[in-house]
Image (cartoon, rainbow, N blue to C red):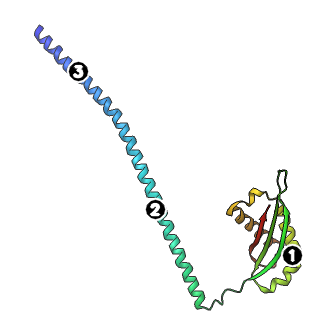
Amino acid sequence: MAGEKKDEAKDKEKTGGASAEGEAATEGQETAAPKSNKKMVIIIAVVLAVLVLGGATGAFMLLHKAGDEDKSKTQTSSSENGGGDKKQAVYYSLGDLLVNLSGEGKHPNFLKVKISLELADEKDLPLMDAIKPRIIDNFQVYLRELRIEDLRGSAGMYRLREELLMRVTEAAQPVRVRDVLFQEMLVQ
C-alpha cells in the first residue's frame, strides 16, 4: 500500500506537473493569441484602407472622365449648331477701386482692384451706367471690412468673387450679371 501511495503521489506530481506545464502553455497561448489578434486587426484595417482609397480614386477618375466626355459632347453639339445658342459676352468695366482694409496693425493695408462685370445682354449697358454708383457703394462697404487674411490664396479670391457677385446681383436687380472678373488686384 505504501508503494501504491508513492505511485499515486508520483502520478499526481506528473499530472500536477503536466497541469502546471499545461497552464503555463495555455498562458503562453493566451498572450500569443492577443498579439496575433492585434496583428490581424491591423492587417485588416490596412487592407480596408487601401480598398477604400483605391475605390475613391477609381470613382474620381471615372467621374472625371465622364465629365470630360460630357464637355466634349456639349462643345461638339454647340459647334454643330453654329454656336447660336450662346450669346456673345458683354463686359462692363467698373474701373479701379481703392480701399483701406480693416486691420489692427500699425501700418494701414490697401486694396486696389480693377473689376469688370460680365453681362447677359448688351441692352443692359445703358442701365449699368445709371446704377454704377450703387454697385460701387456696395463694393466699397464690403471691401473696407475685409482683412488681409481674407484675401490670401485662391480660396480667398473665390470667396471675394462670390461675395461681390451676390452684391452686384442684388444692386443691379433688373440687369442680369453673369460673373465678376478681376482685371487687376494689388494688396499693399
Query: Mark 3 is on which residue type?
Result: Gly
Q: Secondary structure at mark 1?
A: helix
- Residue 127, image x, y percentages: 85, 82
From the viewer's side, name the closer residue of 155 and 128.
155
Determine the residue positioned at 87% across, 72% down: 134
Tell whether label 2 touches label 3 (CB within 8 Å): no
User: Which element carries disc 2, helix, strand or loop?
Assistant: helix
Q: Is residue 93 left or right of residue 57?
A: right
* Amino acid at circle 2: Gly
Which callout, 3 or 2, points at the residue further toward the start of the chain?
Answer: 3
**Closer to viewer: mark 1 or mark 2:** 1
Q: Is residue 179 visible from the viewing direction of this image?
A: yes
Seen at 31% across and 33% down, the residue is: 29
| Image marks 1 and 3: residues in contact by CB distance under 8 Å | no
Mark in front: 1 vs 3: 1
Q: In the image, is residue 159 above or below residue 133?
A: above
Inter-mark Cα distance, 1 to 2: 51 Å
Identify residue type, mark 1.
Lys
Residue located 22% across and 24% down the image: 18
Sequence order check: which comes first, mark 1 or mark 2?
Answer: 2
Task: Give the label on residue 17, or none.
Answer: 3
The residue that appears at 32% across and 29% down in the rendered structure is: 27
- How many C-alpha atoms fall within 10 Å of the one at disc 1: few (<14), some, or many (≥20)? some
Gap between marks 3 and 2 measured at Cα: 56 Å
Give how far across and how far down residue 16 sits, in percent.
Answer: 23, 20
